[in-house]
Image (cartoon, coloured by chain):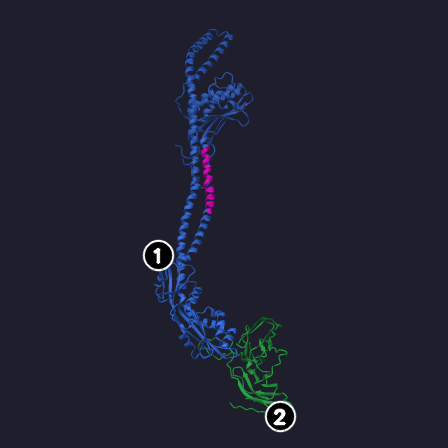
């Protein structure tokens, strides 16, 4: 089973893919750019090698002459030459640094007669003799001789002792290809292949040439060409030196040159990729955590709370983006759930109550019904006894007691019946609160006076409600009776009303002991009393039922200065528009 | 070439053959030589200009061997040279050999003291005497004994311009001309000899010389 994958992990995988793709793309682009730039550079530099060759060819003779001259400045060589002794020359000449590496050295007397020469000097003897002929003091002569090893440059001069006496002639021959190849490679930095016709004389390369010299030779002289062989590709500039007849191939391998660069770019990109990836991870983590993670966790926590049934903690939006919107919607959802739960709760309690009442009611109804007739008989009989003994005050008083108790029983049974009857159709009419309450207060005045209590009315005049006045009056009567019964002499009970935008409240406030918290919840259930003697325990239950039938609520609250306040909260819809009393048009 | 040989006869003692002083002057000018080559004298072809070396300073200097001539008197039955005398010196001073021409009899030696504050390395590749004294600093000296007659060109391996000649003579009677080009050879016994003059870059001059008995001195002019 796959566990949940964190958002961050997905981000990172995505990022890694992006970084890899970018790095690959960058590498290809960079490599391409480098290749193009390098090729450009090589072409420019290759184009300049012709100048290098020309200058080098011009300087070559000078260099040979200078080397020879350096040798002629050697006192030992001069001393040996002065002896004109072949044995001494044989001994001395090879010790000269220049001559030791020369292909050819010939020493002659001032008249050009050869005194000594390196072995095989006679191969080029004709050329040497030509150079020696009529050699003027201080003159240098040069000839290029074609030999097996390639062109040989022979430089000859006469030798003058330091007293000015001409003491001999010297000719030195150097195989050009050896010197040229190395020098030109050093001067230009390119690999050099020296050829003469189809013959390869010398190859100087920093690394083995990947292309055969034969392939390289296919490059036309005079321009830079791209030469390919077996997938290898190089740029070749084929230069011909006119002085020596040498063909010089300058070879530049862009591929070889790019290899270390490629490695460096690759390393750089790996570094950047890893570094950038880590940086991106950190940034994404920080961003996600800050802008998404925290909010998601809050939402998750809220969802868990809601799941546990804790619906009262609001879910606040943490930002004004989609997640904030989600939080808002979430909160709306929570509100809706709470509202529905509360409705269900209320409905459930109502059902429980009505079920219980139905049971009790059915039972009571039967009993009460059976009570009614006997009590009617008792009342009738009592009336009869009273009428017949109207002169006996004692009996009359006893009859009154009997009648009072029976009336209580009648009331009790009536209450019971009414409660048990269940839903009753309301008969709402328009009621002016002033008139309505005045009637109620008048009815209670007597009993309040006897109990030495003050009954006050408080409320704005002119408020009109649409209620069932007789039924609602039973509620108010009940509340006023209760208030009177819990109050002690000298206390005050207030019947009042108030309104706000959403509701209209009718309330009865006493200064009695208040309702103990223990029974406050159950106060409105049937058969619950707060210690009132002679109560049926149905008054408040009936009252609540009536208020609920009105779509209103009945609640008990602690009054501010002690005592209890019972409030009937009617929906604002129960309020009627007030007739215009000042100005305006009365219709 | 006009040759003149003057024999001045002086009164000679009759009893014995007292030695005669042979003196004279070598009038033949030094060889006309090209200017000594500068250390770096290469010029590109076609650029022979007037930039000739100024190092011909040696022309009138004691360091220029061309200015001196070696005069020797040779003949039959010559007495042995006196080899007990102190050997002459050829010093290296101011990058020069001083003197630049020296004569020594066969069997004689020459000292080569270094009087410069740097090294010299005196050597010769001559057939007459091949030697190489190696390098040595100021104050040190080395000696060479010459057993064969002939010309020994002497060089310094370090200093290109240093050059000198040692003439190894097979006679007790010899001299090197002074700056006034005069020479003087004492102790010559009367007799018939050959006088030979050597100068750098020039063929030897050989003349018969008759030293009369009883003459005090003989004056020789070599034109």
The residue stretch that appears in magenta? A278-304
Residue at the image position 42 percent from the left and 79 percent from the top: A133
Which of the two residues, B76 or A19, is positioned nearer the viewer here? B76
Q: Find residue A578 and report its horizontal and vertical position in percent.
A: 43, 31
Which of the two residues, A34 or A203, is positioned nearer the viewer here? A203
How many numbered discs sit on the rendered protein?
A: 2
Distance CA(mark 1)–CA(mark 2): 106 Å
State the residue position of label 1: A230
Checking the image for residue A77, the label placed there is none
- Is A285 colored magenta in this rendering? yes
State the residue position of label 2: B10
**Position of B15 relative to B164 (above/below):** below
Residue A229 appears in view: yes
The hue in which chain B appears in the rendered picture of the protein: green
Tell me the quarter of the picture where residue A232 sits: bottom left
- Is A464 colored magenta in this rendering? no
Please give the letter of the chain rendered in blue.
A
Q: Find residue A360 and report its horizontal and vertical position in percent.
A: 43, 17
Q: Secondary structure at mark 2?
A: loop
Q: Using the image, name the chain to which the residue with label 1 belongs.
A: A
Q: Is residue B219 left or right of residue A360?
A: right
């Amino acid at each position: 089973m796959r566990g949940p994958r964190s958002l961050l992990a997905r981000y990172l995988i995505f990022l890694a893919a992006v970084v890899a793709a970018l790095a690959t793309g960058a590498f290809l682009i960079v490599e391409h750019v480098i290749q193009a730039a390098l090729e450009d550079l090589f072409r420019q530099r290759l184009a300049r090698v012709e100048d290098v060759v020309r200058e080098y060819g011009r300087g070559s003779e000078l260099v040979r002459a200078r080397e020879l001259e350096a040798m002629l400045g050697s006192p030992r060589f001069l001393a040996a030459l002065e002896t004109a002794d072949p044995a001494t020359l044989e001994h001395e000449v090879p010790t000269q640094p220049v001559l030791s590496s020369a292909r050819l050295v010939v020493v002659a007397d001032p008249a050009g007669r050869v005194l000594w020469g390196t072995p095989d000097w006679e191969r080029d003897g004709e050329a040497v003799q030509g150079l020696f002929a009529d050699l003027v003091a201080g003159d240098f002569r040069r000839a290029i001789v074609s030999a097996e090893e390639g062109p040989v440059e022979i430089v000859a001069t006469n030798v003058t002792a330091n007293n000015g006496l001409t003491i001999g002639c010297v000719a030195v021959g150097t195989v050009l290809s050896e010197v040229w190849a190395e020098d030109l490679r050093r001067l230009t930095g390119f690999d050099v292949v020296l050829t003469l016709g189809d013959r390869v004389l010398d190859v100087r390369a920093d690394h083995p040439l990947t292309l055969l010299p034969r392939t390289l030779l296919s490059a036309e002289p005079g321009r830079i060409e791209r030469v390919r062989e077996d997938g290898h590709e190089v740029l070749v500039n084929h230069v011909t030196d006119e002085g020596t007849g040498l063909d010089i191939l300058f070879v530049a391998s862009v591929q070889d040159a790019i290899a270390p660069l490629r490695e460096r770019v690759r390393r750089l990109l790996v570094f950047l990729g890893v570094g950038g990836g880590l940086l991106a991870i950190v940034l994404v983590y920080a961003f996600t955590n800050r802008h998404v993670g925290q909010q998601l966790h809050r939402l998750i926590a809220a969802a868990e709370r809601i799941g546990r049934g804790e619906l009262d903690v609001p879910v606040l939006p943490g930002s004004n983006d989609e997640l904030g919107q989600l939080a808002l919607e979430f909160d709306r959802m929570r509100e809706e759930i709470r509202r529905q739960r509360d409705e269900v709760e209320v409905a459930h309690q109502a059902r429980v109550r009505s079920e219980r009442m139905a049971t009790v009611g059915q039972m009571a109804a039967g009993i009460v019904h059976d009570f009614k007739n006997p009590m009617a008989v008792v009342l009738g009989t009592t009336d009869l006894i009273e009428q017949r003994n109207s002169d006996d005050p004692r009996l009359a008083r006893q009859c009154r007691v009997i009648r009072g108790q029976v009336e209580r029983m009648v009331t009790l049974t009536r209450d019971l019946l009414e409660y048990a009857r269940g839903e009753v159709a309301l008969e709402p009419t328009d009621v002016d609160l002033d008139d309505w309450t005045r009637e109620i207060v008048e009815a209670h005045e007597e009993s309040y006076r006897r109990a030495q209590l003050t009954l006050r009315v408080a409320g704005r005049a002119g408020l009109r409600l649409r209620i069932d006045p007789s039924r609602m009056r039973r509620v108010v009567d009940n509340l006023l009776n209760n208030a009177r019964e819990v109050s002690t002499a000298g206390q005050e009970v207030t019947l009042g009303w108030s309104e706000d935008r959403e509701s209209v409240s009718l309330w009865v406030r006493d200064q009695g002991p208040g309702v103990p918290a223990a029974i406050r919840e159950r106060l409105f259930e049937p058969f619950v009393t707060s210690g009132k003697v002679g109560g049926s325990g149905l008054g408040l239950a009936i009252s609540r039922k009536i208020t609920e039938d009105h779509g209103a609520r009945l609640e008990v609250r602690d009054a501010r200065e002690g005592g209890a306040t019972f409030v009937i909260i009617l929906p604002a819809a129960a309020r009627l528009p007030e007739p215009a009393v000042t100005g305006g048009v009365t219709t | 070439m006009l040759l003149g040989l003057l024999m001045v006869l002086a009164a000679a003692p009759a009893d014995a053959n007292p030695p005669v002083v042979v003196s004279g002057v070598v009038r033949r000018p030094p060889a006309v030589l090209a200017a000594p080559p500068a250390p770096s004298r290469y010029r590109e072809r076609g650029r022979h200009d007037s930039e000739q070396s100024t190092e011909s300073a040696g022309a009138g200097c004691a360091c220029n061997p061309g200015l001196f001539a070696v005069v020797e008197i040779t003949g039959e039955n010559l007495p042995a040279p006196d080899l007990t005398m102190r050997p002459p010196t050829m010093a290296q001073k101011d990058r020069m050999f001083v003197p630049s021409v020296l004569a020594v009899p066969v069997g004689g030696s020459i000292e080569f003291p270094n009087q410069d504050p740097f090294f010299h390395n005196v050597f010769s590749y001559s057939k007459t005497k091949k030697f190489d004294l190696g390098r040595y600093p100021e104050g040190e000296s080395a000696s060479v004994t010459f057993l064969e007659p002939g010309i020994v060109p002497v060089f310094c391996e370090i200093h290109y311009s240093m050059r000198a000649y040692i003439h190894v003579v097979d006679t007790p009677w010899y001299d090197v001309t002074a700056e006034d080009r005069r020479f003087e050879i004492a102790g010559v016994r009367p007799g018939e000899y050959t006088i030979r003059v050597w100068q750098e870059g020039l063929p030897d001059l050989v003349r018969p010389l008759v030293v009369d008995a009883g003459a005090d001195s003989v004056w020789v002019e070599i034109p």
